[in-house]
Image: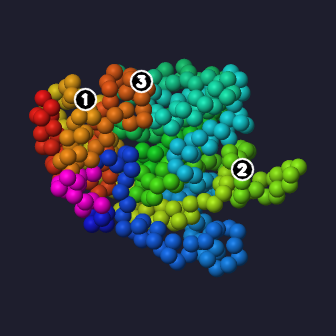
């Protein structure tokens, strides 16, 4: 990996060299991904699956090759288990509707955790409202890790699904999803893993995890925006109804009755983002050349280095400090509002995220107005942290 592969990292922000530390929100794109997008629109742009002409067939081949590439990357048993969506949020909404229609009834229960992103809260709330079901929440211990003892007490004969984040987008904590899946399966309960913050940072093998569903977003994995993945075990997907209707997801349409397409197409209504899928395959090739294990190790070491340097700042509060985490650190400094620090950092060329990070229940639990979040990617290094720390101290000095 070379920083020069990412042209945007050469940008000047307010005449300062950009230091991009907002990767949990979205990552930058290597030249290989930009080239793949241009290649598609330049040489073989045509609607897929439906055309007998050459461009359509070439586009179809690229799209289905990308599906197989994703299946290989995630360790899926079959490409039929990979559904292309608009993003992790869309994947969860699709699952909530489809799974909910088939399996959730009045009085049934769904379990999530205190650490969830809104995308893994609101769709389940909406489902519970529609079906008069009950949403239960795994509480946290004082160290901000999941209370696994409390989790087991939440499970009942009415529990129909558990959906939890693999990695907290606020705290960076790696949740014990293997234990959650094992416990859930002992009760014959399926599990959905929100991998939006784990898939970019660590090796994922859905068969080894034995999760029933797994979601992630291409744009957080150096790929294009507007593309996501819903992985589901084939036996589950075969038994779930489509979430959307239209072209592509049908076998035969009559005014009296419609029959649906086979996997994976019955979940992909309309023209898919076939240029995006091709570009995402290029992103997966790029990070696979580096190696996910190497990325995870490097980012874990850089996270520890950043925490160490942050502790040089007086009155700092680092949340979940010392816990196993990857790529994300949230903190506050004294009584200074995080937005004010983020604004001053921006004028020094430092891009961080401030606010509730689409996880208001967790921020409320922490009893703070928000946090400052530093989040890392494979192109970050110690030089970025060493540029960030004095800028942060300067912001604190100005606001104090």
Span colored in magenta: 8-20
Residue 12 lies in the magenta-colored region? yes
Can see residue 364? yes
Element class at badge 1: loop
Q: Which of 333 and 155 is in front in this view?
A: 333
Count of numbered tags: 3
Query: From mark 2 to mark 1, how far is it between C-alphas?
Result: 46 Å
Q: Report x, y in % for residue 247.
A: 71, 58
User: Residue 93 location in percent, x, y?
Assistant: 59, 41
Residue 75 in the image: x percent, y percent? 53, 55
Q: Earlier in the sequence, mark 2 or mark 3?
A: 3
Which residue does the image show at 46% across and 55% down from the upper left?
Answer: 225
The CA span between labels 1 and 3 is: 25 Å
Of circles 2 and 3, the one toward us is 2
**Residues at marks 2 and 3, CA–CA distance in whole angstroms:** 40 Å
Q: Residues within 10 Å of mark 3 (few under 14, many from 20)?
A: some
Residue 370 belongs to magenta span: no
The label number, if any, that marks residue 372 in the structure image: none
Residue at x 39%, y 50% (from the top left corner)? 26
Q: Is residue 295 left or right of residue 247?
A: left
Residue that numbered label 1 is attached to: 337
């Amino acid at each position: 990996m070379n920083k020069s592969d990412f042209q945007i990292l050469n940008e000047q922000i307010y005449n300062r060299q950009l230091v991009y530390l907002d990767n949990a929100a979205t990552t930058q794109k290597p030249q290989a991904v930009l080239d793949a997008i241009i290649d598609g629109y330049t040489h073989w742009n045509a609607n897929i699956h439906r055309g007998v002409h050459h461009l359509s067939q070439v586009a179809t081949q690229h799209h289905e090759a990308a599906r197989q590439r994703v299946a290989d990357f995630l360790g899926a048993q079959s490409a039929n288990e990979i559904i292309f969506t608009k993003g992790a949020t869309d994947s969860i909404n699709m699952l909530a509707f489809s799974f909910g229609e088939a399996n959730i009834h009045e009085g049934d229960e769904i379990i999530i955790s205190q650490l969830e992103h809104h995308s893994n809260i609101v769709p389940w709330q909406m489902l519970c409202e529609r079906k008069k079901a009950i949403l239960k929440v795994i509480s946290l211990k004082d160290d901000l890790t999941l209370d696994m003892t409390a989790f087991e007490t939440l499970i009942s004969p009415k529990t129909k699904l558990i959906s939890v984040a693999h990695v907290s987008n606020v705290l960076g904590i790696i949740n014990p999803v293997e234990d959650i899946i094992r416990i859930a399966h002992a009760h014959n309960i399926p599990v959905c893993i929100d991998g939006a913050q784990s898939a970019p940072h660590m090796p994922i093998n859905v068969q080894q995890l034995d999760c029933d569903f797994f979601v992630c977003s291409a744009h957080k994995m150096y790929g294009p925006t507007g593309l996501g993945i819903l992985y589901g075990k084939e036996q589950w997907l075969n038994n779930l109804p489509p979430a959307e209707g239209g072209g592509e997801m049908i076998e035969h349409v009559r005014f009296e009755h419609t029959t649906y397409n086979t996997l994976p197409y019955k979940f992909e209504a309309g023209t898919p983002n076939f240029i995006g899928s091709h570009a995402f395959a290029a992103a997966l090739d790029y990070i696979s050349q580096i190696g996910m294990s190497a990325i995870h190790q490097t980012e874990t070491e850089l996270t520890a280095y950043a925490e160490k340097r942050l502790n040089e700042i007086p009155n700092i509060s680092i949340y979940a400090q010392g816990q196993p985490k990857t790529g994300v650190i949230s903190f506050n400094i004294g009584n200074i509002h995080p937005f004010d620090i983020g604004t001053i950092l921006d004028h020094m060329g430092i891009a961080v995220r401030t606010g509730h990070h689409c996880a208001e229940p967790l921020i409320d639990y922490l009893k703070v107005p928000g946090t400052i979040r530093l989040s890392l990617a494979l192109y970050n290094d110690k030089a970025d942290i060493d540029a960030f720390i004095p800028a942060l101290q300067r912001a604190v000095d100005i606001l104090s």
